Image: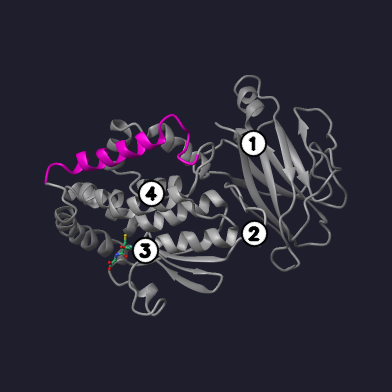
Amino acid sequence: MRGGLYHWTIRIERKCTSRPQLQLGIHGANHNQPWRLVTTSRCSWSRDDEPWQDRAGGDRRVVQKELSQLGVVEGSMARRTRSAGLGFTFACSLALFAASAFVGSWKLQARACPSRLAAGATASPAVKLYQFESCPFCSKVRAYCDYNGVKLNKIEVNPVTKAQIDGVAGDYKKVPIADVDGEIVTGSADIIRKIGAVIGSSETEADAEWGQWVDSTLVKTLPPNIYRTPGEALQIAGKVGDSFDPVSGTVAKYFGGAAMFFVAKSMAKKAGIAEGKEREALYESCAKWASALGEKPYLAGEKPGMADLEVFGVLASVEGTDTHADMLANTGISSWYDRMKTACGRVSTGLCLSFRTALSKPCNVNRCRGFDGKLKVL
Ligand SMILES: N[C@@H](CCC(=O)N[C@@H](CS)C(=O)NCC(=O)O)C(=O)O
């Protein structure tokens, strides 16, 4: 577990009246101690095995139907779990806004990504994203949403038939297409900015400038690289194919992969990337980004901004390919890339978030009963 403060956004709904309390445990890898609870009757902070501490502004608890933010401060956890397996600090703060309706059930939803609604933002939008898993434009929307704690309902589109987007946005037949709170938005840049507007996060001048560079230059270096050879073409096409039933998946993988192998050659020509110079073009773009970063952790400073997320999203779309491995090994962006992965909640923290219900009264860590499940945070 590395780096600062880890956040989860949780929403709890009540299921069973005989189990009036729900508890959230945060614990070390393999369900080991140390661990601490947040309950529906109490949510405070504690350190190691010390008693609960009162919060400065008074104790607060997790309230059902609300989205609550739960955070683990990494410092002591990382050090102590490695040595004696003892203690961490955790903080829990409430509560952004009323969420879904009471459905008569305890239900815990958690995700390993932060919720970063700006002050004044009304709510996290409901977003349905029509996408290809391997599409760089879709990937930047996903990165933006992951970082900002916006949950996505992803619909994987078959790249050969595109049946899933039939009639969704008129004649527009590209992905991503998003339904943001009922409004259909096409094009990754517009989708990101629309979501940004809802969560109260606006674009800076640098974001606008780099956003254009991402679409006009960076993204164009990818197809010539990932489809450079038939073997490489299958690495990326396989990411698409895995999302469908075996027959459609195989067709999408081999038919799509073969088609893209040829399409990418003409894309390279259009982008002015000579045969044999594919990696060079990608490395050049990465070098430009690395030099813009300079010594800063992120282009936007101490935290990732929209431009960081767009660049990261595009590059993350080719994870698992030779192109991606070569890029990280041969350019100066790998530390930034690692930080971005962590910031977007894509690095395993080694922590588990578990949930359980207690029978009738608040219980402490040793006396909990009715263990209901465990969510591994990836
Ligand atoms: N400018 C668009 C580009 C979208 C785009 O080109 N998507 C590709 C997938 S990476 C696509 O849908 N291609 C299918 C097609 O052109 O028919 C955006 O930013 O979303």
Q: Earlier in the sequence, mark 1 or mark 3?
A: 1
Helix, strand or loop status at disc 3:
loop
Q: Nearer the viewer, residue 290 or 42?
A: 290
Which of the 4 image quadrants contains residue 141?
bottom left
Give the farthest residue toward the front: 205
Q: Amino acid at mark 1?
A: His
Q: Which residue is mark 3?
A: 244
Sequence-wise, which precedes: disc 3 or disc 2?
2
Mark 3 against mark 2, which lies toward the viewer? 2
Distance in Å between CA atoms under marks 1 and 3: 34 Å
On the image, numbered disc 1 is attached to which residue? Answer: 31
Q: Earlier in the sequence, mark 1 or mark 4?
A: 1
Q: Residue 51 at x, y = what percent?
A: 84, 31
For badge 3, the amino acid type reads: Phe
Q: Is residue 262 visible?
A: yes
User: Ligand 1 closer than 8 Å to the CB at disc 1?
Assistant: no
Whole-number angstrom distance, CA of label 4 to CA of label 3: 34 Å
Give the Cα distance between marks 3 and 2: 37 Å
Colouring mode (rainbow / by chain / secondary structure / one colour): one colour
Query: Image quadrant for the N terminus?
Result: top right
Q: Where residue 205 sits: x, y (%)?
A: 45, 50
* Distance between the alpha carbons at the discs numbered 2 and 1: 36 Å
Residue 31 vs residue 11, the one in the foreground: 11
Above or below residue 13? Residue 43 is above
**What's the magenta bit mostly, secondary-structure-wise?**
helix
Range shown magenta: 275-300
User: Earlier along the polypeptide chain: callout 2 or callout 4?
Assistant: 2
Q: Residues within 10 Å of mark 2 (few under 14, many from 20)?
A: some
- List the residue tagged with mark 4: 210
Res. 121 mark: 2
